[in-house]
Amino acid sequence: MRNRPVFATLCCALGLLLSGGSKVVLAQQEQQGLITSVRWLQFCGGPLSEPAEPGCHSYLQGFHDSAVTLVELGMPLPELQKRLGCIPGNVSIGQLRSVVAKHLRSHPERLHLPLGRLVAEAQRVAFPC
């Protein structure tokens, strides 16, 4: 039965549609290989005393590296700071993980939004310029 995967996908999509719109968005993000805000919080939202999944710090480091690259490619620093805040140089990746996790837990109504958007929001709130 060559149509079995198509049928299974349609059934899965219908189930997600019937169970709520935000689940559809999360499923689409996960199908695209994106780390959702919900998934990141599940794996990375524990206290600093608990070891984090390797991807937790990697995601945040990649986010930071992307911001540095944007400046190197010509994005004006004030524009970037307006969007991401001004993180002091002595902030550890573990502390940043705590800031992001706290922000996500404080705003469960926003967990359907892309993780990068919420990371930027958390940084901007915690480390205003």
Image: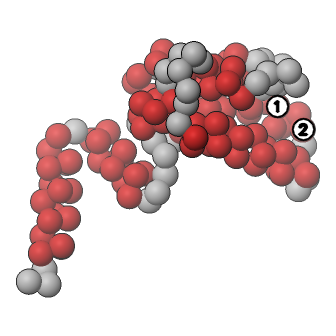
Residue under the image location 48 percent in, 15 percent down: 106
Q: Is residue 11 left or right of residue 55?
A: left
State whether residue 98 is above or below residue 113.
above
Residue bearing the label numbered 1: 81
State whether residue 61 is above or below residue 73.
above
Cα gap from disc 2 to disc 1, whole angstroms: 6 Å
Q: Residues within 10 Å of mark 1 (few under 14, many from 20)?
A: some
Report x, y in % for residue 43.
46, 33
Q: Quadrant of the C terminus?
A: top right
Report x, y in % for residue 13.
20, 56
State whether residue 126 is above or below residue 119.
above
Residue under the image location 45 percent in, 42 percent down: 36
Residue under the image location 69 percent in, 20 percent down: 95
User: Disc 2 vs disc 1: Cβ atoms closer than 8 Å?
Assistant: yes
Q: Residue furthest left?
A: 1
The amino acid beneath tag 1 is Gln
Task: Tell me, yes or no, if residue 75 can be seen here.
Answer: no
Residue bearing the label numbered 2: 77
Residue under the image location 18 percent in, 73 percent down: 6
Mark 2 residue element: helix
> Which disc is residue 122 wearing?
none
